Amino acid sequence: MSGFSNLSSYKGKFVKPEGDVYQKNEALTKRIIQLCNHLSGKPEEIMSKHILTSATNVGKYIYKANFSIDKMLFLSNMHKAYENCIEILYWINILEANNLDNGRALESLLADWSDLIKIIHAIVRSNISTLEGEGIELDIVKTS
């Protein structure tokens, strides 16, 4: 799964990455923005800024991966997206553990981000296997 073909259609215009993983992230990031707006002006606002940064970073790295010029850059960017998803789970768990929002909304958000992590994890693992099969030695931390 790589966005190499998107580069040929660029031609100076804005091109959105294709694929379910980007669309799912975009929808989840919108939900994070709503959560951050809800927490605005509250003591939890500082946590919401961390969550928002992580969520937008996931999208940024998926976007960068989609337009990567080689498989290693694709894998590196998807791995960074994966790491930022894990940070989001951390922050949502902190909010949930401290009853800082409607529990059901956070449970749903947690479940949906967990689903995205599974997708990104599968992409990372698949690409690691492919590159190793091609005899390429990897320096990134392997995910389990």
Image (cartoon, grey):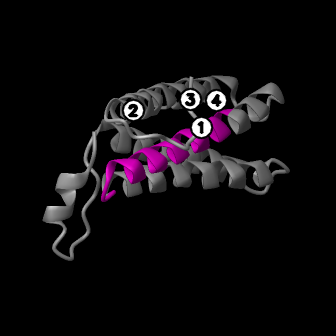
Residue 141 is tagged as 1
Q: Which residues are magenta?
A: 68-89
Marks 1/4 in contact by CB < 8 Å: the verdict is: no
Instruction: Calculate the distance from the C-alpha at mark 3 to the C-alpha at mark 1.
Output: 6 Å
Residue 36 is tagged as none
Quarter of the image where the C terminus is located: top right
- Magenta span has 74? yes
Q: Is residue 14 above or below residue 128?
A: below
Q: Which residue is mark 3?
A: 143
Tell which circle, 1 or 4, labels the residue nearer the N-terminal end: 4
Marks 3/1 in contact by CB < 8 Å: the verdict is: yes
Marks 4/2 in contact by CB < 8 Å: the verdict is: no
Q: Which residue is mark 4?
A: 106
- Determine whether, in the image, residue 46 is placed left or right of residue 53: right
Mark 2 Cα-neighbour bin, 10 Å: few <14, some 14–19, many ≥20: few
Instruction: Calculate the distance from the C-alpha at mark 4 to the C-alpha at mark 2.
Output: 38 Å
Q: Which residue is mark 2?
A: 132
Q: Along the line of sight, which residue is nearer the eye, 123 or 92?
A: 123
